[in-house]
Amino acid sequence: VVTVRSERMAEPSGTAVETASFESFVTEQYARLVALAGLIGGDVTAAEDIVQTALERAWRSRGSLRGDGTLRPWLDRIVAREAARDRRRRLTWLPRLLRPPTVAPLQPPADLVEDRDATRFPERAALRLVLDGLSAPQRAAIVLHLHAGYSVDETATILGVPRETVRSRLRVAREHLRRALAEGD
Amino acid sequence: MDHRSTDDRLDRLMARYLAERDAEIIRDARPAADVARRARPGLGATLAPAMPGVRSGRPLPLAMLLAALLAALAAGAAVVGGRIIESIADPLSGLVTEEVAPGVLRVINDDAGHELAALRVVEIAVGLDGAVWMNGHGGLFRLGEPGNTPGTTGRWRTELAVGTNGTVWSGDGYGLRSFDGERWVTHPLGIETWAIGPDESVWGAWPDENYWSRSQDGRKPPGFELARLEGDRWVGMDLTGWPDDLIGDASSPYGPGLSATADGSLWLFAADASERQVLMRYDGTTWAAVPTPIDPRWITDGPDGSWVLVDRNVGTHDGETWIARFADGTWSESRVQLPDATEYWSEDQVRPVVASDGAVWLRVNLPDSAGGRMHVFPEGCDGVARVVGSAWTHHLAGTCIWDMEPGRNGEVWVATWDGDMQRQEPGDVYLIRPDGSDS
């Protein structure tokens, strides 16, 4: 048994997020949240369902939010976690067996054949191959840091992992991409 | 090209690809306004009551109304303003109610003058003496007793609990209060996840990395902590030897869960880093993991001292729901088939309860009749299901639930969102009798 400083543990409740703020935020940010879910979950068709689920979770637990200033990272976190959870659900052992291996021969995905920017095809194919092959937690780190604009520390906080874990996930993604691009040259 | 510039180039490539994919996804997404309407009840909710007091949106058959009217008149009730009013006798004398469906009573007020809808009840607890305690925007009060508990008005998330010796507890981040039947004692150290354990010990749990619930001075709470209140301080447990990465999932908005059962056991619900549910039990001396036949969502008292577990994934698998009971040293499971695609909020704050007649009550979220798609507010709120064995009945259709609490005679108290579902704030309180059915 260890003693914990009592003042550190005492958490006064804050003001629940205002209804109008939540409503306004959802309206403004909905498309961005769907994109976030789609990028992390990897299944665009499921992205809207993921966001709806996340919004319900957020709404029900909004009493724990402290002020409007943290609304975006708070909601992004819920969406990110829900998207990761959805991806894990879909990628059970059977789909994993059927899924192409991460280090697959670099073949153009069918829907990229008509990519209008032919010069970017190998690069885009490599990016898609690499990012699709990442696990949900890895994708979440990449998307939040490189796309949503969160710092490494903020990403770590949002995902609830140590800062070094985020850095490690970034390194892994870079390494995969480096190899994929080298193979495509 | 040095290592850092290579990393920057790779990062830029990934960022550009993600931005392009983002644009593609947004292009295909539905208009925001359409979704905002689903996202909260205040926007475009159209489920208007079919008649005053009918919350389900389904008009009652005329014959049913006439029968209820005749029954009420025969029982000596009065008709006021077109509503059917009756006074319920023992054990809940003094309540003014209207029967909105067979067995489903909307409680309007009590003989102490509390207008329940106006008080916006969020939490309900039933004491060992049968007294009904309610908390909401109107403060904390006991049904039938005038006045509120001092210092409790307006708390939104104040939890209520009854200890094994009948002490009533109320608490939130502002503090904990206990009522021994004569006086209230205030404990200044607040917490949002707490439960009363063996010998009336108070336990609290803090989620790991729950960064948005940082205290108002900006300090982040520590990693997961389980602690017991001793005097004026929390004493944390040494969690050495507990499952690895326990509470990994508690970085979710919901954190760990604490529950107590009448035998004095204290239960901790958590998840490890793999999101596997872990159920820990404290018997007054030690904590130990309890193997369970189903993924536990919540544990509560069943009849005859048994424990009842409800599946974490109620209804998420084609409506299939599992309930497990522990009695005489063994678990037994029962399967309930809710409608296909029934969705139940696996981490819902509305906890399943077991009534004194053994029926299990769940908050449910039935499929939308238009296409079977799950919706959020308000369409996703669909009342409660009363489960007996493998059969179930549906009550308060279309109503969002804040809390449920079993009474002492098989009935269940239900605090709901505002009945017309144009607002998300708490509204009415219902009392559902065990023999009622509006399925």
Image (spheres, helix red, strand yellow):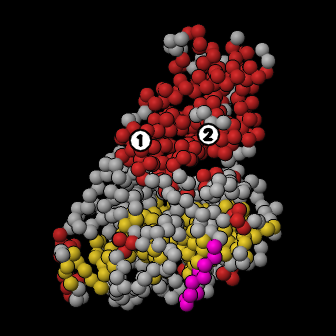
Q: Which residues are magenta?
A: B178-188
- Distance (Cα) linking label 1 and label 2: 31 Å
User: Splitting the image into 4 quarters, where does residue A127 fall?
Assistant: top right
User: Splitting the image into 4 quarters, where does residue B87 fall?
Assistant: bottom left
Residue farthest to the front? B217
Identify which residue, B172 or B24, lies in the foreground: B172
Check whether the beta carbons of the residues at disc 1 and disc 2 lie within 8 A of each other: no
Q: Is residue B405 visible?
A: no
Tag 1 secondary structure: helix
Q: Chain of mark 2?
A: A
Which label number is shown at residue A27?
1
Give left or right: position of B117 versus B293: left
- Residue at 19% across / 79% down in the picture? B80
Which label number is shown at residue A91?
2
Amino acid tagged 2: Leu
Q: Is residue B180 magenta?
A: yes
- Residue at 18% across / 75% down in the picture? B81
